Every structure is written in structure tokens, then in C-alpha cells.
Image (tube, helix red, strand yellow):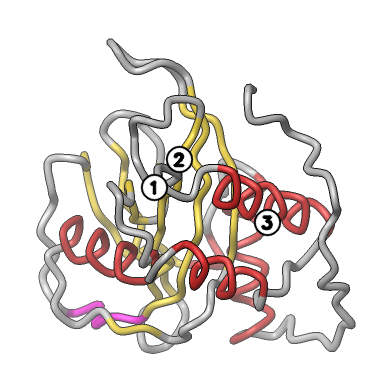
Amino acid sequence: MDSSQLIALLRAYCPSDPAERSMLAEILHLIQTHPADCAHRSLLHGHLTASAWILNANRTHVLMTHHRKLNRWLQLGGHADGDLDLPRVALREAREESGLNSIRFLADDPFDVDIHNIPARKDVPQHLHYDVRFLFTADDQEPLVISNDSLDLAWLAINQLEPPDASIQRLIRKTQQRFGKLKTKQAKNCSLPRHPHRSEAE
């Protein structure tokens, strides 16, 4: 997947609310202005990442990692490291961080997009992760293998999660709308703002 194909994939995605719509516009702006290095950590102000929102077969639990560096429970995922095929990145990171062989896509298109701040650490300055999330399923009976990036891994009940931020809250809401009792019919405005509100220099 090259930058034009990634842009096409993201332009076909319909955000769930104005905040996500704005973040999608900023991610597209990053790719368009930095087509050669938007997926590299060397782009110090921010770069592309990919995440995996992994549900069990009953869609009642999600696989979360207790992230070692950030000390928070988060979805699995990581850096693209130059690979613009973000679905492939999300799948690779999910397998590496869980040890699961049963992970499968539930949808080919993105499930969510987000931009979040990563605090400075050692020689890495504070920067942004322009994150594209994909929806997966896996066998929750398969043994988990905790990677060096994690303090723990667990299948957590979606209806009992205490989301640490609006990003996880949005993922939970989307899951409940798609698979649970909160299914709603809502018209979505998929038009993107012309000028992202967050500058590249931030």
C-alpha cells in the first residue's frame, strides 16, 4: 500500500462525530504533506501508528494490554515503522503483542481514528501518534503471550471497562452500537473540514 492508496482508504472512512472527523482530516493532512516519512519515527513531531481492537467471538470482551511505558490499559498496536499498509501493521502488532494465531479481521475498513499525545521519554521528545484502528476477533481460549512491551494482557468485559480517555470511550460506544443493544440508525456527515485545527508544529 502506498500513500495514495492509504489516502483513498481513509477518505472512504466515515467518522462517528465531529471530533473524530477533525482528527481524520489531520491524519490525511499529515500523509499528504509528508508522503515519504509520515510512517517513520524520524518524523519527530508525530507519525502514523496502527491499533487493533480485538473482540472475542461473543463480542463481550476486548483484549487489552497494560502498556509498560505508559502504564495504562490500552488496545494493542504500535508504530508503522515505514509501512503504509496500516491494516497489515495493526495485524502484525496484535500478533506480536499477544502471541495469538487466531486473530482475524472483522472488517477491512478502519474502525476508528485518533490523535493522541505521547510524553517525552529519554531521548524521544513529546510527539503525536496519528493512530488508525482496525477491528479484529480472536479466540479468547487461546493462551496469551505477554511481550516485553506489556506488563499484562487480559480479556476485559466491555460493559465493565473504565475507559481512561475519550478515545477508548468512543471505541466502546462503537462496539456497543455495532454488536450490542445500542444499535442506532444515524445519518453521518462524512465531509471533512478543510483546515485541520492542530498545526503540524504542535
Task: Work out how far the residue at label 3 is from the one at label 1, CA to CA, in angstroms.
Answer: 16 Å
Q: Secondary structure at mark 2?
A: strand
Task: Work out how far the residue at label 2 is from the one at label 3, CA to CA, in angstroms.
Answer: 14 Å
Number of dots carrying numbers = 3
Which image quarter is the N terminus in? Answer: bottom left
The residue labelled by disc 2 is 47
Where are the magenta residues, as a range?
A: 137-141
Of labels 2 and 3, earlier in sequence is 3
Q: Position of residue 123 (x, y in %)?
A: 29, 11
Of labels 1 and 2, earlier in sequence is 1
Mark 1 neighbour density, 10 Å: few (under 14) some (14–19) many (20 or more): many
Classify residue 35 as left or right of residue 37.
Answer: right
Q: Residue at x 21, y 39 (%)?
A: 151
Q: Amino acid at mark 2?
A: His
Q: Residue at x 10, y 59 (%)?
A: 145
Of labels 3 and 1, earlier in sequence is 3
Tell whether position 139 is magenta.
yes
CB atoms at circles 1 and 2 under 8 Å apart?
A: yes
Q: Amino acid at mark 1?
A: Ala
The residue labelled by disc 1 is 39
Badge number at residue 197? none
Q: Position of residue 89 (x, y in %)?
A: 30, 62
Badge number at residue 24? 3
Q: Residue at x 61, y 42 (%)?
A: 165
